[in-house]
Each structure stands twice: as structure tokens, then as C-alpha cells.
Amino acid sequence: MMTTDCFALMGSMGWMGWLMPLIFLLLIGLGIAALFKYLFVSRHNKEDRS
């Protein structure tokens, strides 16, 4: 039910309705990748300096 409503809303908005969720997922993915990079790369750099 919820998926059908979501697709109906996306279809009524035209190409922007399909572009916005893709951009949103891309930004979430980049944020998660940046978080992992920050956590693991900064930890390795601290060990190298010691």
C-alpha cells in the first residue's frame, strides 16, 4: 500500500519525482562512506604517528 502511494506520487511529479529519491540515497551513501573513512583512516593515522 505504501509503496504504491509512493510510486503514484513520484509519477505525478514527473522526472523530479524520480530524481529526488535517487539523490537522497546517493547523499546517504556518501555520508556513510565518509563516516567509515573518518573512523578507520583516522585510527590508522594515529597508530602510525606513535
Image: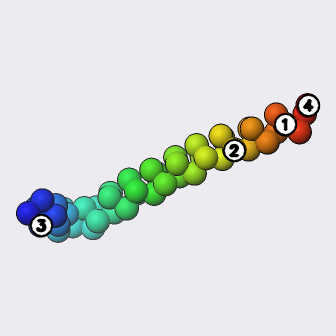
Q: Residue furthest right?
A: 50
Q: Amino acid at mark 3?
A: Thr
Residue bearing mark 3: 4
12 or 8, nearer to the observer: 8
Residue drawn 32% across the image and 58% down it:
21
Q: Amino acid at mark 1?
A: Glu
Q: Is residue 25 visible?
A: yes
Residue bearing mark 2: 40
Query: Is residue 14 shown above or below 21?
Result: below
Are the residues tagged 3 and 4 within 8 Å (C-beta)? no
The C terminus, quarter of image: top right
Which percent across, then down, holds residue 38?
66, 41
Numbered tag placed on residue 31 in the rendering: none
Q: Quadrant of residue 20?
A: bottom left
Q: Is residue 8 visible?
A: no
Residue bearing mark 1: 47
Comes first in the chain, label 4 or label 2: 2
Q: Residues within 10 Å of mark 4 (few under 14, many from 20)?
A: few
31 or 8, nearer to the observer: 31
- Which label sits in the foreground, 3 or 4? 4
Comes first in the chain, label 3 or label 2: 3
Drawn side of residue 25 relative to residue 46, left or right = left
Circle 2 SS class: helix
Comes first in the chain, label 1 or label 3: 3
Disc 3 and disc 4: Cα gap in Å? 56 Å
Q: Amino acid at mark 2?
A: Phe
Are the residues tagged 1 and 4 within 8 Å (C-beta)? yes
Q: Residues within 10 Å of mark 1 (few under 14, many from 20)?
A: few
Residue bearing mark 4: 50
